[in-house]
Amino acid sequence: MSSYFSLFIFLYVVNISDKSLGEMFTSVMSVKQAVFAERQLVDYLRIYLEQEIQRLDDIKRFFSRVTSLHSGIYNEPSATIANPIVAFKLVKRLTSEWMNVVNSNEAEENINALREGYRRMEGSLPTLEDLQGAAQGLMRLQDVYHLRVEGLVRGHFQRITDGNAFDIYKPPVSDTLSGDDCFLVGKVAYDLEDYYHSVQWFEEAVHLFRGREWSPEDEGTLEDALDHLAFSHFKTGNISYALSLSQELLLHDPMNSRVHFNVEKYEKLLDESPPATNQSLDLRRPDSTYLRTRNVYEKLCQTKGSQPKHFENPRLFCDYFTNGNPGLLLQPIKRELISLQPYVVLFHSFVTRAEAKSIREYAVPGLRRSVVASGVNQATAEYRISKSAWLKESAVVGKMDRRISMVTGLNVQPPYAEYLQVVNYGIGGHYEPHFDHATSDSSPLYRLKTGNRVATFMIYLSSVEAGGFTAFIYANFSVPVVENGALFWWNLHRNGQGNVDTLHAGCPVIVGDKWVANKWVHEYGQEFQRRCSLNPEE
């Protein structure tokens, strides 16, 4: 490899080995950058193959030359070897050329170069945590949107309705999952003792592994899948099927003492307690131990809930809005009143496409795993899968702050509001039901010493192909992603109490790269912009 090429690789690796790539599964932007990392690995592999092909061609030429001698002049060895030149070449070949071929280090040098290239790229590659996170993203989509695993395996996003499978979204570009892909998803669930999911994914893995040869890039095998599937069925109570799978596994691995022990155990359990003939063995998804609103949340992600149409509720309307601000007189903003309780407004075309792109690009270097309030501290959580960055002073951020202030009438300058937070969602990225305002006096939100979050202004910086709704749980409606639009709602009542109807969630993104920007406005500094009511209950 030339020194110029090596320098190029080094600079390339330095360029993409960025801190924002950590926890890659939490940001689609980071996953996109992984494409370039794999492209570099493909180049390393291409160089390796070219060198190996050259090496094997050299060996083939040596083989062809020696073979032709033995089928030609060596047919009569007595007469041939009498020739001193022929004899010399034979001795020379056997003492030098064969030794050079057999003891050549070229193959080792080639594979070491490939391994060294991989090591250079390692910091830019996904980790085991990313694989687990991506697998959990697929299972999250499966659950929230009631997707069929069989459909996902074929690259389809399908749901069963009235006994029939239909596509909830048909992506223009997709791919299928292999047996090894399904095995690894099932293994992630299995390691989490989530046998509801492991059974479904191992079933597909076994189906795909059967009748095909093992590939060297695969981690799992048919035997592995049968083994894990049998135990998963045992853990879900289906002992008969666990026994059947274990017996099939013994056909492939008859000396496996552990599986023999399991077979004996399953047979004993079935003898002691035979399954009832009418016993249902349908897999049942476990109840959530922490998300009491799971069913409503998932329903709102699949549909738009009971959101009334404007013609059904005359108090909901669309208009061109100026808010009495001179800056909006010549170009009023398009306002759509989505809900009265809680009060939620959608401002259409709040940013231009160029402004949205500029904000995304400005945020990229600062993207880190999103956190949530955890007592008096902040921590990452599985119920929020995204990366976020806080943007301070810049021309485009200043323009956003002024525009938000014009349409809301609020003081959005720090410390009366937080810096603009830009969020990029990950694989199956979501944010389960939560409040934006603090619900505990120990919340880290109070460190600003400017009160609670009185209002939320959320800007959609991109479109998505499917999923990603903003769902208001108790209010029972959801809003799809509207590219370049912005949602606004009050988190607190006028008396300063939290509005429970603002419990909301970011639904998992099925397909797409979802970016939003959040502006959280605090109570202090808004005393004359949003006055208290004479009614203490309001």
Image (cartoon, rainbow, N blue to C red):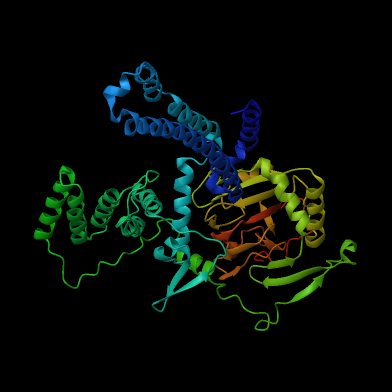
Question: Residue 437 location in percent, x, y?
Answer: 62, 54
* Res. 449 in view: no
Question: Residue 504 location in percent, x, y?
Answer: 57, 61
Relative to 448, say whether 9 is above or below.
above
**Quadrant of image for the C terminus:** bottom right
Seen as rendered, the residue at the extreme front is 79
Question: Residue 362 location in percent, x, y?
Answer: 73, 45
**For residue 248, what is the image quadrant?**
bottom left
**For residue 320, what is the image quadrant?**
bottom right
Residue visible at 80% across and 60% down in the picture:
409
Relative to 237, say whether 35 is above or below.
above
* Res. 4 in view: yes
Q: How many marks?
A: 0
**For residue 217, what is the image quadrant?**
top left
Question: Residue 462 location in percent, x, y?
Answer: 68, 58
Left or right: where does residue 332 sit relative to residue 478? right
Relative to 296, say whether 433 is above or below.
above
**Quadrant of image for the N terminus:** top right
Residue visible at 46% across and 46% down in the picture:
131
Left or right: where does residue 389 sit relative to residue 298? right
Residue visible at 41% across and 79% down in the picture:
162
Q: Which of 103 and 441 is in front in this view?
A: 103
Q: Which of 102 and 520 is in front in this view?
A: 102
Q: Nearer the viewer, residue 208 or 2?
A: 2
Relative to 127, say whether 336 is above or below.
below
Left or right: where does residue 157 sit relative to residue 340? left
Residue visible at 61% across and 40% down in the picture:
20
